[in-house]
Amino acid sequence: MSGSTNQSSTPLRSLGLLPVILFGMMWASFGIVAFIQISAWGRAYDHKMSRIATGTVPKTTLFVASIRPNGDDQPGWIVWLSSDRTQRARIVAARQVASADGLSVGQELSAYQFRDEYLIPTLDRGGHSWGRWLFLAFGLVPPMTVAGVAGGVWLWRRRKPADAGPRF
């Protein structure tokens, strides 16, 4: 039995860098795709808001029919909206909101219909601009950090002993 160990047989060396690189590329792709998708949602929201501001979309009044908790394991509320105040009114929209403060059953809300969907400015808020940058950072910072550290380790290991300077 030999006392020497073969360093190339360790699990990390036998895998190589390919899985790490592929995982980093998938992670970064997630951040980039999320950035693009959230940007598209933001542009669509801004386009709808500009149409509302110019008056090309008529205002509709919806009424809060019911406000219920979202569920046992999820925070927030679900607001059910109807086209009139009657008890048996047909529900035309529902929104999940973080807080039901300021909302009451029977309350009138201004809404604007786009195809089969309503935009309700008091419930449907934008906020896409900061979210897209958050996802881009989440997707790019970890792989870039790992690549930077790996590059630094690789350079440190490749330096010549004469270039190493004094060791303490």
Image (cartoon, rainbow, N blue to C red):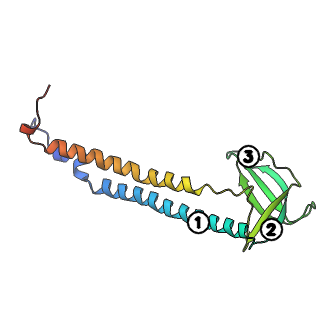
User: So how many labels did they put on this image?
Assistant: 3
| Marks 2 and 3 close (CB-CB < 8 Å) | no
- The x and y percentages for residue 135 are 49, 54
Residue receiving disc 1: 43
Label disc, if present, on residue 12 of the rendered structure: none
Quadrant (top left, top right, bottom left, bottom right) of the N terminus? top left
Give the vertical position of 138 relative to 162 (above or below): below
Measured from the top left, where is residue 142 in percent x and y? 39, 48
Q: Residue furthest left?
A: 162
| Residue with the most extreme front position | 54
Q: Is residue 159 above or below residue 56?
A: above
Three-letter code for the amino acid on which mark 2 is drawn: Lys
> What amino acid is found at the position of numbered circle 3 in the picture?
Ser
Q: Earlier in the sequence, mark 1 or mark 2?
A: 1
Count neighbours of disc 3 (C-alpha within 10 A) and say few if under 14, some if 14 to 19, many if 20 or more.
few
Residue on which disc 3 sits: 99
Q: Would you place residue 7 above or below residue 83 in this image?
A: above
Point out the image quarter for the C terminus: top left
- Separation of marks 2 and 3 at Cα, in angstroms: 24 Å
* Image vertical order of residue 85 relative to residue 163, above or below: below
Circle nearer the N terminus (2, 3): 2
Could you tell whether 65 is left or right of 165 in the image? Answer: right
Work out whether residue 74 or residue 67 is closer to the camera in this orientation and state it. 67
The residue carrying mark 2 is 59
Between 56 and 39, the one nearer to me in the picture:
56
- Please indicate whether residue 25 sits to the left or right of residue 46 in the image: left
Q: Secondary structure at mark 3?
A: loop
Q: Quadrant of residue 115?
A: bottom right
Comparing marks 2 and 3, which lies closer to the viewer? Answer: 2
Q: Amino acid at mark 1?
A: Arg
Is 162 left or right of 113, judged from the image as shown? Answer: left
